[in-house]
């Protein structure tokens, strides 16, 4: 029996949005050890009212409520509908790319984890072990779904983790400060486990290119980087104590994130610290799913 593609698409989009809604909870609660992901039900961060199920419909509720809490009218972060729409969009794109297949299922789990990693890293500059370590194991486990792929996965895991670990250690030796966090090391090991070692060149190359492009764009556009230049940072710290040394534009994020800022921040050079690398690794891993084969074919033919 043939199911009409429109029905499959609607169901997949809806499923994606629901999982995106769950990812929002993960992004908010996972970094905070004191909160459980399954309980209690979602509350408004402003007035602490439990959010009704009919106000918790992915993407739609955000616009029906005109971006405000029904009870206290406090603005709802744009991030909720963005994460939901992004997850739904990825589900549909993966379906378009891979059809209804085990590739679709496995890659969707993978990209959902990357969405959570990306937003947690943007918020707090951490990549939680709660995602990266089980993620490495699950990725390696899934590799057995394809004959022989487990070897690529295992090498990818070891090389991915190893390369960044050596880079990070080398940088630390030369500059006497930590350049790349161990979170990024574990993330690249995760990417290698899910995508195989062949992906690592692509992922590192495009993550770096896009990272540099964004950094240059931010410098040109005069976007205020956080944390600020180390000199300013120290001055502010002496003047007002460590509490006031938070850059002003991080206030909004602090509301959602009761976890303390990474203490390493003041040690890292400002460009590396201002732009976390994890989201770029995640983006280029998703790009690899869509363009990886094409890129390697082009490289072999082009050179
Ligand atoms: Zn409220």
Image (tube, grey):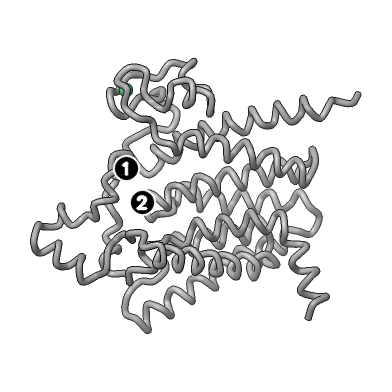
Q: What's the residue at 54%, 60% (across, down)?
A: 281
Residue 69 or 103: which is nearer the viewer?
69
What residue is disc 1 on? Answer: 257
Residue 178 found in image quarter: bottom left
Q: Quadrant of the N terminus?
A: top right
Q: What's the residue at 17%, 67% (across, down)?
A: 234
Q: Position of residue 81 (x, y in %)?
A: 50, 33
Report whether 229 appears left or right of 286: left
Separation of marks 2 and 1 at Cα, in angstroms: 8 Å
Determine the residue located farthest toward the front in the rendered image: 221
- Any part of residue 158 in sight: no
Comes first in the chain, label 2 or label 1 = 2
Q: What's the residue at 43%, 16% (across, down)?
A: 52
What residue is disc 2 on? Answer: 124
In the rendered image of this protein, does residue 193 appear above or below residue 27? below
> Residue 249's mark?
none
Q: Position of residue 262 (x, y in %)?
A: 30, 57
Q: How many marks?
A: 2
Assess mark 1: CB under 8 A from ligand 1?
A: no
Report whether 110 appears left or right of 129: right
Q: Quadrant of the C terminus?
A: bottom right
Residue 217 or 44: which is nearer the viewer?
217
In the rendered image of this protein, does residue 81 appear above or below residue 132? above
**Of helix, strand and loop, which one carries label 1?**
loop
């Amino acid at each position: 029996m043939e199911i009409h593609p429109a029905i499959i698409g609607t169901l997949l989009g809806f499923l994606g949005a629901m999982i995106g809604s769950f990812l929002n909870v993960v992004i908010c609660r996972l970094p905070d050890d004191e909160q459980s992901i399954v309980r209690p039900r979602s509350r408004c961060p402003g007035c602490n009212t439990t959010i009704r199920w009919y106000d918790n419909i992915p993407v739609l509720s955000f616009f029906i409520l005109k971006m405000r809490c029904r009870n206290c009218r406090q603005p709802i972060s744009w991030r909720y509908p963005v994460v939901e729409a992004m997850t739904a969009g990825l589900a549909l794109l993966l379906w378009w790319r891979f059809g209804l297949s085990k590739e679709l299922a496995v890659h969707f789990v993978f990209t959902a984890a990357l969405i959570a990693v990306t937003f947690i890293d943007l918020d707090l500059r951490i990549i939680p072990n709660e995602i990266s370590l089980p993620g490495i194991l699950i990725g390696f486990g899934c590799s057995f779904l394809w004959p022989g792929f487990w070897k690529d996965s295992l090498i990818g895991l070891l090389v991915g983790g190893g390369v960044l670990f050596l880079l990070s250690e080398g940088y630390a030796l030369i500059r006497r400060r930590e350049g790349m966090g161990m979170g990024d090391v574990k993330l690249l090991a995760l990417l290698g486990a899910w995508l195989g070692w062949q992906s690592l060149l692509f992922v590192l190359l495009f993550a770096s290119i896009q990272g540099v492009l964004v950094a240059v764009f931010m410098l040109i556009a005069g976007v205020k980087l956080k944390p600020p230049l180390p000199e300013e940072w120290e001055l502010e710290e002496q003047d007002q104590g460590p509490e006031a040394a938070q850059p002003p534009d991080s206030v909004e994020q602090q509301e959602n994130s009761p976890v303390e800022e990474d203490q390493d921040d003041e040690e890292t050079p400002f460009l590396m610290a201002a732009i976390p690398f994890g989201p770029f690794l995640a983006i280029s891993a998703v790009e690899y799913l869509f363009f990886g084969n094409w890129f390697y074919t082009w490289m072999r033919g082009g050179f």
